[in-house]
């Protein structure tokens, strides 16, 4: 039961994603491209000297670029073959900030006291992800009401109450899954769709049928993205 609370709470943080190990950043800061990305950033409520741009592969981070932070400002330039989630890390802190890297000029403000909720502007995909995350958080706030009841029932070894709470937890997970699939269908021509769909592979119960239906809705261009390829591999193996 405790694992349910950990699982559902971690989902909305989006601090990791599974992608194939492919060369997704080309011509970074040293050789900027006109059709690539420019990321301008600012830190708040903290100091760091170096910031690192990391590709996420499975549960590991692989550094692909870095730059010095001057007056709490930094910048990255380069080009990505497909939009993907990347992680920003720092030399002075043991945490990471997740964002979608897409070929556009956009900005990010990171409050080092709340790195999980950066302010990202001028990025259509990050804006779409924010809409998704905000609704997901509303769903998962129901956990706040369940957890005290769960603790009390566990201390009292109340099996019946624990079973009832377990049923409610599964209902929350189901509500989240339904919302996710509806969001993917509404954004089937966007690269945000396979990014969110790939997260469905982390659920305690994987809905293979709906994952397959959602994958078939994606446009041919979107299906070439790393997240979509990960889903295709999963479906091939199942």
Image: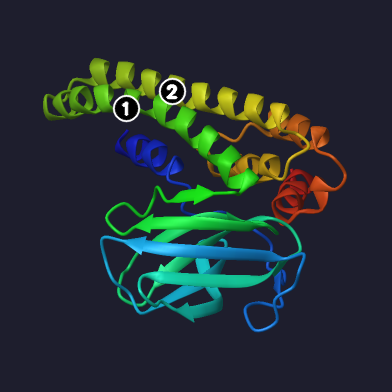
Q: Regarding mark 1 in the picture, which secondary structure is present there?
A: helix
Residue 33 in percent (x, y) is at 74, 73
Name the outermost residue toward the right.
220
Please report the residue visible at 53 percent of the width from the left and 55 percent of the height from the top.
99
Q: Is residue 114 above or below residue 11?
A: below
**Sequence order check: which comes first, mark 1 or mark 2?**
1
Quadrant of residue 79 in the image?
A: bottom right
Label 1, on which residue? 143
- In front here: 122 or 180? 122
Residue 174 in percent (x, y) is at 51, 23
User: Which quarter of the rendered picture does the N terminus lie within?
Assistant: top left
Residue 122 in percent (x, y) is at 59, 49
Please report the residue visible at 66 percent of the width from the left and 42 percent of the height from the top.
192
Name the outermost residue toward the front.
71
Quadrant of residue 86 in the image?
A: bottom right
Marks 1 and 2 sit apart, C-alpha to C-alpha, by 8 Å
- In front here: 220 or 162? 220
Residue 234 in percent (x, y) is at 72, 48
Quadrant of residue 73 in the image?
A: bottom left
Residue 54 left/right relative to 30: left
User: Which quarter of the rendered picture does the C terminus lie within?
Assistant: top right
Please report the residue visible at 61 percent of the width from the left and 41 percent of the height from the top.
196
Q: Regarding mark 2 in the picture, which secondary structure is present there?
A: helix
Name the outermost residue toward the left.
156
Q: Are marks 1 and 2 in contact (CB under 8 Å)?
A: yes
Label 2, on which residue? 172
């Amino acid at each position: 039961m405790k694992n349910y609370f950990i699982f559902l709470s971690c989902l909305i943080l989006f601090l990791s994603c599974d992608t194939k190990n492919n060369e997704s950043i080309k011509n970074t800061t040293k050789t900027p491209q006109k059709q690539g990305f420019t990321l301008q950033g600012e830190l708040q409520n903290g100091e760091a000297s170096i910031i690192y741009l990391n590709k996420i592969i499975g549960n590991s981070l692989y550094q692909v670029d870095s730059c010095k932070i001057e007056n709490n400002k930094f910048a990255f330039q380069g080009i990505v073959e497909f939009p993907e989630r990347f992680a920003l890390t720092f030399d002075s802190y043991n945490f990471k900030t997740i964002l979608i890297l897409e070929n556009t000029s956009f900005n990010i403000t990171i409050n080092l006291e709340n790195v999980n909720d950066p302010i990202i502007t001028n990025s259509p995909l990050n804006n779409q992800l924010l809409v998704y995350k905000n609704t997901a958080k509303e769903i998962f706030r129901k956990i706040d009401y369940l957890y005290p009841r769960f603790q009390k029932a566990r201390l009292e070894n109340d099996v019946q109450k624990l079973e009832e709470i377990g049923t409610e937890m599964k209902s929350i997970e189901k509500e989240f899954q339904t919302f996710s699939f509806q969001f993917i269908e509404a954004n089937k021509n966007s690269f945000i769709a396979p990014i969110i769909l790939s997260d469905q592979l982390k659920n305690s119960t994987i809905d293979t049928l709906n994952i397959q239906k959602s994958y078939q809705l994606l446009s041919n261009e979107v299906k070439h993205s790393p997240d979509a390829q990960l889903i295709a591999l999963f479906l091939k193996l199942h």
